[in-house]
Amino acid sequence: MHYREFRYRWQYELKSAPDKLWPLVADTNRFNRDTGVPSVETEGKQRLRNARRRLRFSFLGLPLEWEELPFEWVRPLRFGVTRSYSKGPIAELRVAAELSARAKGGTHLSYQVSAIPKSLLGYVLIPLQIGLLSARKFRTAFKRYDAMATGEAPIHIQEPVDLLAIAASRLESFREKIVLDQGDPGLVEKLVDFVRSADDFSVVRIRPYVLADEWNEPRRAVLETCLRATRAGLLDMRWDLLCPLCRGPQESASSLREVNSKSHCDTCRINFTVNFDRYVEITFRPNASVRNVDIKDFCMGSPQRTPHVVAQQLLPPGVTRSLFLPLEKGNYRFRTLELNGEQAVAVEKEGSGSATLRLGPQGWSGDPLSLFTQSTLDIQNDTDAEQLFILERMQWSEQAATAAEVTVLQIFRDLFSNEALRPGEQISVGTITVLFTDLRDSTRLYRQIGDATAFGRVMNHFDVLKKAISDEGGALVKTIGDAVMAVFREPGPALRAMLTAQQILASPGEGNSPLTLKAGMHMGPCIAVTLNERLDYFGSTVNMAARLESLSSGNDVVVSREVFNDPEVRQLLGAVENNLQATPFTVTLKGFELEQFELWRIGRRELASACGSSRH
C-alpha cells in the first residue's frame, strides 16, 4: 500500500548570526542527542561508495535499519541528509536546515523534515512523533543553541551531571593538589568545574586551546593547567592521530610509545605518515576515578565532525549544480572521495564572482581557480559515476595543541620525563628552533675558583638557562658537560631567552665573577627520537645549530639566515628599546663544506665592543 509523504517545516527567528549558530546547529550528533534520538550503531563492515553508511537503532522497542547518504552542506547556510530504511515503519526520511541572515541582525532558521511511511504503524507514528513530540524538542534545542551562540548560556552544559560523593570529594582534593603544584587557582577552578558539570561530548575529548578560546584565557596557561591536572590524576592524557584529509582522530594512544609513524584512515581510504606538527594532537579526558564518560554516537555523518570542509555535495553522473559560496580568504581544494587528484582554489579579493568547475573522465582541469569571497560556482560531474565533491580549507586548525608544540614545553618534559617514542621510531616534528649554549672559558673557571665552587656556579647557570627557556615556552632537552641543547617552536622566543640568560649571567651577585654564555641557533625540520629513554631530536638542523654555538663570542647569539629572516626576530631587532644590533658574516661550517653560510651575530649594542672581530 502506498502512503502519502508527511512534510513539516518549522521556522525560527534567532538572535545570533548564521556563522555563530552553525557550529551548534550543524553538530547533528549533539542535536540528535538533545532531541531524544537514540544512539546509533553501524550495520555491517562493508564499505559503501561515497561515505554511505548502514546504520541502526531501536526506537520505542522497534528495530530500525537504514542506508544513510552522505550529508550535503554549504557552510554556514544549509545542510541536509536522506535516509532509506530497510527495516521499520518508515520508508524514507529527509532532513534539511537553512540559515539566512536577517536584515537587522540574527538568523532566520528553517528546519524541514519529510517522511514517507512504510506501514500503517508508520502512518500513525510519524505525525505523533515528528509532528508533535519532536517539534517541541526541536524548538527547545534551537533556542538553547541561540543562547549559547550569543553568550547567554554556557556552551558545554546540558544538564547537571550526577557525581558520586566520593568523586566530588576527589575533585576537591585534585583542585588543591594542582594549585599546590603552582597551578593558576582561577584556571584550576574553571577546569575542575568543567570536569564536574560539562556534558559527556565535551569532556570525552578535551582540547585545551578550544577551552582557552572559550574562556578568553591564554592558550599556553590552559594547556599547562591540563598537564598539571594529568600529573595530579584529575585528567588522562591522550595522543590522537589525525587523518590529513578528514582530520578526524583515527587512533588514540595513552603514551607516545604507542604512537606509530604509519597510520590508516578507513573513511578516506588512505595510508599516511604521522608527523608531530599536524597529525598528532594532545587531548584529555577525566580520570575514571572522578567521572566515567560513556560516549555514544547519535549521528555518524554530522557536518561539524569535519569543520574544515566548507561544502560537500553528492552529484550523480552528468549533473551540474550551482552553489553560492561565502568563503574566507585563503587556500582551498576541491576533491572527491572516490577519485584521486584535486583542484586548487584560491579565495582572494581579486577573485572571480562566478566560475564553472568541471570534473571529467581524465580528472580535474588542473588550472588553479580564483574565487571572490562571495561567489557562485557551478560544479559539473562529467564522469560516468556518482561523485562526492568536497571543498575544504587547507589551513590547519589553530585550535589543535599538536605534539610538536607540547613536547617543546619545559613543563611537559619536567612532568612527563618518561614520555618518549618506542625505541627505533622516528617521527618528523616539522620546523622547530634548535638552540645550543656553552660556557666560555669554563676550564679556566675551575682552575681559578676550585672544582667544588665552579661546579656550583655551573649548576646555577643551568637553573638560569632553564628558567629563561621555560619562560619563553621552550624546553631544555639535555645538558652535555657545560653545554645545553634546547628547542622552541619559534625563533623569536628563543632569541629573547638567550639574551635574557646572557644578561643575567654577565651580572652575577656580589663576590662572583661574571659568566660568559656562547649561544647559537638554527631553525628547520627535525626528527624526534628516543635517546637514553628521553625524547630527543636529530637531523641537519640540530647539527648546524651545534656548529653555530662554537662561533659565538659569548656576548652574542649567532643565528642562521632562517632565524634572522623570521618576522618576529626582525621585529625584535627593529625595536629601539631592545638596543640590539645584528652583524652579518659568512663562514664554512664543518660537515657542510660545500656551502658558504651567511650568519649574524646578534647582541646588545653596549656589548658590541666585547664581541671583537667576527670569527670565521
Image (cartoon, rainbow, N blue to C red):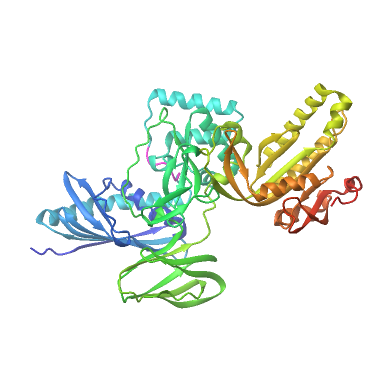
Quarter of image, res 47: bottom left
In the rendered image, is residue 192 in sight? Answer: yes
Instruction: Tell me the residue at 58%/32% (across/down).
Output: 417
Q: Quadrant of residue 195?
A: top left
| 433 sits to left or right of 283 | right
Q: Nearer the viewer, residue 47 or 194?
A: 47
- Image coordinates for residue 231, horizontal then vertical, percent: 53, 30
Which segment is the magenta one?
Answer: 154-159
In percent of width and height, residue 281 lies at: 50, 46
Frontmost residue, 171 versus 532: 532
Please give the name of the residue rendered at 18% of the width and 64% of the height, measured from the top-left corner: 5
The image position of residue 18, as x and y in percent, is 44, 60
Q: Is residue 156 magenta?
A: yes
Please indicate whether residue 604 sits to the left or right of residue 525 in the image.
right
For residue 326, side relative to residue 559 (left or right) = left
Q: Residue at x 49, y 37 (%)?
A: 257
Examine the structure image and report whether residue 147 is included in the region drawn in magenta: no
